[in-house]
């Protein structure tokens, strides 16, 4: 989408050529529309042969290519596989099944393939239902925030909370964000949800202050909310209206945002920073952002993704990555928060490495408001 028509067409032609090269002459390849291609592989093949073919295609497509002055451009693909006659008797049915498998491959992380299974249609039905029902989630007050405390390692004080959204569905009970946030991002509902989350977090800050508790709250801002160019102004206005101190709301953005929209992200962060709203880089270490970008971004905090913290005590390589991230954060004047701390050993190790803050099940799970207040009242550093 960002390339413009000519370069986009050039890219598609190059990819199409590579796809053709990955096929045998008796197989058929067709562009289905947009950036989707379909293949018909004739003859009998066992699973292994198909896996090998999928692997070949993935490798072939992701080799670097050059289009219009853009050197070393790389693209990834996701492949879904359906087989006659088990997954469908007609081409149309087979295509539908393959399409479901593509979604599964995408969800499992890009640049992979998946075979169709009947359970995928069930998953698709659930998604379609949730999609319909999500419109009521905000308007009928079905969303709620849970709060996970974050503590400072030097004195064990609770210095911050992270607000995590849950959908209290009338039939399904509490739906976890992993199930509906990606859907909300695709449909644009995320903007409404994000707005609600900030509103609720700001109200919570007010309620806590009335009870003599002043702990800043961090809210998550999704990449998809960035399509709204006035997002920073809206956030600042929301804080103003709520009447709470500007420093009491923090914003977490993921590292992937830095890579995709450098200039815009930079402007967004600058605006927030000038308004006194602090920013944390979430899931740090998972997005491979270049160090030079990192130096240019005015963020205050860096959150080490929990995949690094997990098993850090048993895995030397993970431990040294954590070391490096802490040093990097400090050298850029950022304070460092380790996510997903589940054991005493992990906490002790992080303390010995001068990590600033920890968040994780060891301290507390995300708690509903009443439980959180109770936790804060009875907490002893
Ligand atoms: P995240 O921002 O990385 O949030 C941290 C997640 O790690 C939370 O999952 C939290 O419950 C979980 N967690 C915390 N400590 C531990 C631990 O010790 N061990 C393990 N295994 N997990 C731990 P949760 O609440 O399910 O949220 C998942 C993701 O959904 C969040 O990841 C965030 O990306 C997204 N999300 C949650 N709330 C919002 C929101 O209001 N807006 C947006 N845009 N995204 C949200
Ligand atoms: Ca977060
Ligand atoms: Ca995170
Ligand atoms: Ca995450």
Image (cartoon, rainbow, N blue to C red):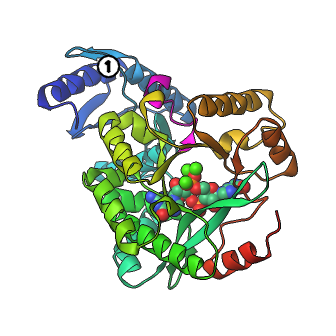
Q: Looking at the image, which residue is at 40% across and 60% down? A: 183
User: Image quadrant for the N terminus?
Assistant: top left
Q: Looking at the image, which residue is at 26% across and 37% down? A: 35
Residue range (magenta): 282-294
Residue 158 position in % (x across, y down): 71, 61
User: Image quadrant for the C terminus?
Assistant: bottom right
The residue lying toward the viewer, choosing from 306 and 71, is 306
Q: Looking at the image, which residue is at 73% across and 32% down? A: 318
Which residue in the protein does label 1 denote?
Answer: 18
Residue 273 position in % (x across, y down): 41, 47
In the displayed structure, 315 sits above or below 191; it is: above
Observer able to see residue 89: no
- Quadrant of res 130: bottom left
The residue lying toward the viewer, choosing from 23 and 7, is 7
Q: How many marks?
A: 1
Q: Secondary structure at mark 1?
A: helix
**Residue 287 magenta-highlighted:** yes
Q: Looking at the image, which residue is at 70% across and 65% down? A: 365
Observer able to see residue 321: yes
In the displayed structure, does residue 83 sit left or right of residue 341?
A: left
Residue 198 position in % (x across, y down): 43, 67
The residue lying toward the viewer, choosing from 142 and 20, is 142
């Amino acid at each position: 989408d960002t390339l413009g028509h000519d370069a986009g067409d050039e890219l598609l032609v190059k990819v199409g050529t590579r796809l053709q090269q990955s096929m045998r002459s008796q197989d058929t390849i067709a562009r289905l529309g947009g950036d989707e291609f379909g293949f018909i592989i004739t003859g009998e093949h066992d699973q292994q042969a198909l896996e090998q073919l999928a692997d070949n295609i993935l490798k072939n497509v992701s080799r670097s290519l050059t289009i219009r002055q853009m050197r070393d451009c790389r693209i990834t693909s996701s492949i879904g596989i359906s087989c006659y006659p088990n997954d469908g008797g007609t081409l149309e049915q087979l295509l539908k099944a393959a399409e479901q498998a593509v979604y599964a491959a995408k969800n499992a992380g890009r640049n992979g393939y998946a075979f169709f299974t009947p359970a995928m249609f069930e998953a698709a039905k659930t998604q379609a239902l949730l999609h319909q029902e999500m419109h009521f989630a905000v308007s009928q007050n079905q969303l709620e925030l849970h709060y996970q405390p974050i503590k400072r390692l030097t004195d064990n004080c609770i210095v911050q909370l992270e607000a995590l959204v849950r959908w209290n569905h009338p039939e399904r009970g509490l739906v976890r964000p992993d199930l509906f946030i990606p859907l909300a991002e695709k449909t644009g509902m995320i903007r409404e949800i994000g707005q609600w989350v900030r509103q609720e977090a700001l109200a919570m800050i007010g309620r806590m202050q009335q009870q003599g508790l002043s702990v800043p709250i961090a809210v998550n801002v999704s990449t998809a909310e960035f399509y709204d160019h006035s997002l920073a102004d809206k956030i600042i206005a929301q804080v103003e209206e709520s009447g709470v101190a500007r420093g009491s709301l923090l914003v977490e953005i993921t590292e992937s945002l830095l890579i995709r929209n450098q200039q815009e992200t930079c402007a967004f962060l600058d605006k927030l920073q000038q308004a006194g709203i602090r920013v944390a880089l979430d899931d740090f270490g998972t997005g491979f952002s270049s160090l030079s970008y990192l130096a240019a971004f005015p963020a205050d905090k860096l959150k080490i993704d929990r995949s690094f913290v997990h098993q850090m005590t048993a895995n030397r390589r993970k431990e040294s990555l954590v070391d490096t991230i802490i040093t990097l954060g400090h050298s850029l004047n950022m304070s460092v928060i380790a996510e997903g701390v589940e054991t005493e050993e992990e906490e002790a190790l992080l303390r010995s490495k001068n990590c600033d803050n920890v968040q994780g099940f060891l301290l507390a799970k995300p708690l509903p408001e009443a439980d959180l207040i109770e936790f804060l009242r009875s907490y002893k550093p």
